[in-house]
Image: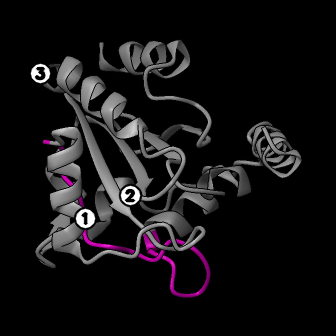
Amino acid sequence: MSKFFKIFILLIFMFNFFSSASANYKKLAYDFSFKDNNEQDYSLDQYKGKVILVVNVASRCGFTKQYADLQKLYDENKSKGLIIIGVPSNDFGNQEPGSNKEIKKFCETNFGITFPIMAKTNILGDTGHPFYKWVEENYGKSGVPKWNFYKVLINKSGKIEDVYSSITNPSSKKIKNKINSILQ
């Protein structure tokens, strides 16, 4: 493992513990929508009362193999009310350069993805998607993705339950136990 990668992982780990969540919730997750892979509005409102895991994804990232674990998590829990939403972004290392059509084909062909994959979306900065600005408002800076495959878990009330860094695999006990506890 390179020295840079070790430092990067350490920084992600550290930021995960320093949340200054204000949780004022002027809005809920259901108040947001993304553009789906066909550039149509895709409202989170359709998932009221469900548990939602929003993951910013990329096809050329070292964490891309997490797609398989996300699909497995989805298959195991979709009948219980879990929705996983993939949000492709090119914001981190230009690791999602493809078109929406290419991204969808990549996900389906290589990982058999059946959960919704949105259109490529800006996450960071002034042009960042309002959902991620809402996450920062209500969870603090540790809720803002630092890299690809950052996970935001929304509970049945439409509020942020927890966030998980890129290094936390979707198959980890930490994520599975939290999802199981809020699905009940």
Front-most of residues 182 and 148: 148
Is tag 1's residue or tag 3's residue first in the polypeptide sequence?
3
- Give me the C-alpha separation between circle 2 and circle 3: 27 Å
Q: Amino acid at mark 1?
A: Ile
Q: Residues within 10 Å of mark 3 (few under 14, many from 20)?
A: few
For label 1, the SS is: helix
Is tag 2's residue or tag 3's residue first in the polypeptide sequence?
2
Q: Amino acid at mark 3?
A: Ser
For label 2, the SS is: loop
* Residue 94 coordinates in the image, percent (x, y): 53, 74
Q: Residues within 10 Å of mark 1 (few under 14, many from 20)?
A: many
- Give me the C-alpha separation between circle 2 and circle 1: 7 Å
Which residue is drawn at the image coordinates 11% and 21% (left, top)? 79
Residue with the mark numbered 1 = 103
Placement of 52 over or under 41, stated as above or below: above
Which residue is drawn at the image coordinates 23% and 51% (left, top)? 107
